[in-house]
Image: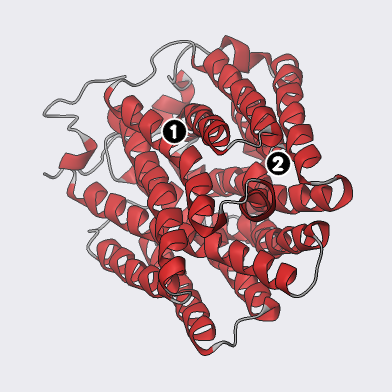
Amino acid sequence: MTEPTLDNPHPFRVRNFRYYWVSRLAMTLAQYAMLLIIGWQTYNIARDGGMSIAEASGQLALIGLLQFLPLFVLTPFSGLAADRFDRRSLALLTVFAQLLCAATLGWATWTGAIGLPVLYAIAIVLGIARGFAGPALSALAPNLVPKPILPTAIALSSIAWQVGMIGGPALGGYLYAIGPALPYGVAGGLFVVSLIALSLIGKVPQPAARTDQRPIGAIIDGLRYVLRNKMVLGAITLDLFAVFLAGATALFPVYARDILMVGETGLSQLAMAPAIGAAITAAWFSFRPIKSNVGPKMLWAVGIFGIATIIFGLSTSMPLSLAMLFILGAADMFSVYIRQSLILLHTPDDKRGRVSSVSLLTISASNEGGDFFSGSLAFLIGPVAAVVAGGVGAVLTVLLWSGLFPVLRTTKSFDPPEDLLEGEQTEHPQEA
């Protein structure tokens, strides 16, 4: 890793990156406040309507599925859009769509019109918006800072994400206790802040779009690159299967209401614990970035993630549950930091939108798809058994992937191949 110099400043000295960071922080705060309350309202409406714990868990599974399906269908096209159109403008549109979702949920909750059909419909719209937001924002970040400090910028961007994951659930849970519509009102304000910050970002370099390639061919070209690059493919799919199987977060409403019995404030604490662990880890990396044995360390981190999930699933103690979720979040951030750095640094700029879309599709599959899997498994075998089985599956995934993708065990640094370096553009804005 290169230390900041006059030629390679700290990312926060780059004006455009500062605005990007504020925008991502505000958007993530709003997103996670909304997502927590959507899950909480869904579970409570189902339980108050006479459904059993298993049946209400199935409703959480459906919410996850409704968010995942639009992402699954649209993400390859949204990745192409991020490579063909202005990434900042695309991100602005997606934040505005999420602002409309917050306003709709706030109005429905305030007037008492909130119900499962409304929550299902908003879940679909959020899935569409996030499907286009992810590739645009991920592909935008590498064009805001010089390449030598990109891993540091990734760590700082992850801090914004993780701080949002901490503050979002805190806002959602505690504001809901004051007034059920209040979290959506605050989320709407945060989306406005995100829109303003994105609007202040200046002109950003955009890779020249190929005019000799049809859209479907361009999408296939991006997928082909992922399949041929064993480093990128192994890193992406490791996260896909590990987090898909160990999706404990989807069942937080079940644990808060019916297992740990800690209510809305306890729900907020459960959601905050992994994000706090992740934020501390990301902050550490922004000052002390990893420099060696990055592949093996990523595998170990995912293994620890699985073990912490198993212990959380078995716990009936709130302090032990919070401790395991803290470790789970720290381990997840450890692997996320390495994986995102490897993927971005091992991908040409003209393919970053499409490769980011593939990466984000797997993240969605592991998160929202994992929510559906965990909720469905909880419906079949119970929430505790579902969480424990998922943690075991994550550990087994690490063992299997270390054999299927030896490059993950042998990668020592973030340095990309020489042929990729030769083809990359080197000019980046470095304004103070």
**Could you say which is closer to the camera, residue 354 or residue 61?**
61
Q: Residue at x 63, y 74 (%)?
A: 119
Q: Residue at x 36, y 54 (%)?
A: 24
Question: Could you tell me which quadrant the N terminus lies in?
Answer: top left
Q: Quadrant of residue 114?
A: bottom right
Q: Is residue 271 visible?
A: yes
Q: Is residue 74 found left or right of 54 in the rendered image? A: left
Q: Earlier in the sequence, mark 2 or mark 1?
A: 2
- Relative image position of residue 294 (x, y in whole percent): 49, 16
- Relative image position of residue 420 (x, y in whole percent): 46, 27
Q: Residue at x 58, y 35 (%)?
A: 321
Density class for disc 1 (Cα within 10 Å; few <14, some 14-19, many ≥20) is many
Q: Is residue 376 found left or right of 155 in the rendered image? A: right
Q: Is residue 31 found left or right of 231 in the rendered image? A: left
Residue that label 2 marks? 244
Q: Amino acid at mark 2?
A: Phe
Density class for disc 2 (Cα within 10 Å; few <14, some 14-19, many ≥20) is many
Residue that label 1 marks? 277
**Callout count:** 2
Q: Is residue 395 shown above or below 122?
A: above
Q: Is residue 298 shown above or below 147?
A: above
Please, which residue is most extreme toward the right here?
380
Q: Is residue 318 shown above or below 16?
A: above
**Could you say which is closer to the camera, residue 102 or residue 169?**
169
- Relative image position of residue 255 (x, y in whole percent): 65, 48
Mark 2 secondary-structure assignment: helix
Q: Amino acid at mark 1?
A: Gly
Mark 1 secondary-structure assignment: helix
Label 2, label 1: how far apart the Cα atoms are: 20 Å
Q: Is residue 106 found left or right of 223 in the rendered image? A: left
Question: Could you tell me which quadrant the C terminus lies in?
Answer: top left
> Could you tell me if the residues under marks 2 and 1 are in contact, i.e. CB atoms within 8 Å?
no
